[in-house]
Amino acid sequence: MAPEKELVQLIGFWGSPYVLSVRWALKLKGIEYEYHEENLLKKSPLLLQYNPVYKKVPVLLHNGKPLVESLMIIQYIDETWKQNPLQPQDPYERAKTLFWAKFAHEKCIAPMVSSFFKIGEEQEKCVKEACEHLRTLESALEEGKRFFGGETIGFVDIAAAWMGCWARIIEEILSVKLIDEEKMPRLIAWFSNVVEVPALKECMPPTQNLLEHNIKFRKFLVAAAERLQSVPLTGN
């Protein structure tokens, strides 16, 4: 009897970089999957069923079993499908890889994203924090190497190198500076090396579409904040 075909499904949103990183992992592994585009303003029963806690994308379904959070999904993909490994075989090197992926998400990407939701001094604080940690991330990149772990694309590249594109979008919309080309040349080169990999480049949403989407989103956030501030604070 032939083995039962595995069913892989991805619930995502076209403009989410976290969904993009999962798509990159699936692409490099050569895994076929069904894609379900999510409406984040009117979340589907499918999303609410399989991610009832966070109600966010991405969600990967493997034979009906859900996984959430992009880093954990990528790790699961790499450990489940052995071809084209994304993590080192050596346990110590694998632990270092996970450390830098988490550092990129928690210390670099998180304040970048937070800056998009802030104004004034709070926004400046987030930008400063992101810049400081981006410099630390650059210090972990080896001089002359194409990718984070050397000459082969790997876990950290897939998990975090998309931030270069999104940083430029945030810079343009907020009129701030997150990545200094003169002070962070290795970081700039790394971003470019990853997104220019043909298999990954074809998954990238058009930059102009991302910019237009995030401009609208920023306007929505500002309008919501202004409405909140206009609400009277007096009680009954």
Image (cartoon, rainbow, N blue to C red):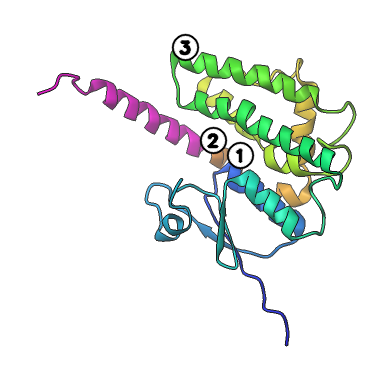
Residue type of the residue flagged with mark 2: Leu
Can residue 90 be found in the magenta stretch?
Answer: no
Query: For this rendering, which residue is in front, 91 or 51?
Result: 91
**Would you say residue 123 is visible in this rendering?**
yes
Q: Residue 56: x, y in percent?
A: 48, 47
Q: Is 50 left, or right, of 93 in this rendering? A: left
Residue type of the residue flagged with mark 1: Thr
Residue tagged by mark 1? 207
Distance Cα–Cα, label 2 vs label 1: 6 Å
Closer to viewer: mark 3 or mark 2: 3
Looking at the rendered structure, the secondary structure element under dot 1 is helix
Q: Residue at x 9, y 24 (%)?
A: 236
Q: Residue at x 59, y 15 (%)?
A: 128
Q: Residue 208: x, y in percent?
A: 57, 38
Distance Cα–Cα, label 1 vs label 3: 28 Å
Q: Is 234 left, or right, of 101 in this rendering? A: left
* Residue 9, quarter of picture: bottom right
Q: Is 34 left, or right, of 97 in this rendering? A: left
Can residue 230 be found in the magenta stretch?
Answer: yes
* Residue 226, quarter of picture: top left
Is mark 2 in CB contact (under 8 Å) with mark 1? Answer: yes
For disc 1, the neighbor class at 10 Å (few under 14, some 14 to 19, many from 20) is some
Q: Residue at x 79, y 22 (%)?
A: 139
For disc 2, the neighbor class at 10 Å (few under 14, some 14 to 19, many from 20) is some
Residue type of the residue flagged with mark 3: Glu
**Number of numbered discs on residues:** 3
Residue tagged by mark 3? 121
* Residue 141, quarter of picture: top right
Residue tagged by mark 2? 211
* Segment colored magenta: 212-236
Looking at the rendered structure, the secondary structure element under dot 2 is helix
Question: Where 218 falls versus 158 (above or below)?
Answer: above
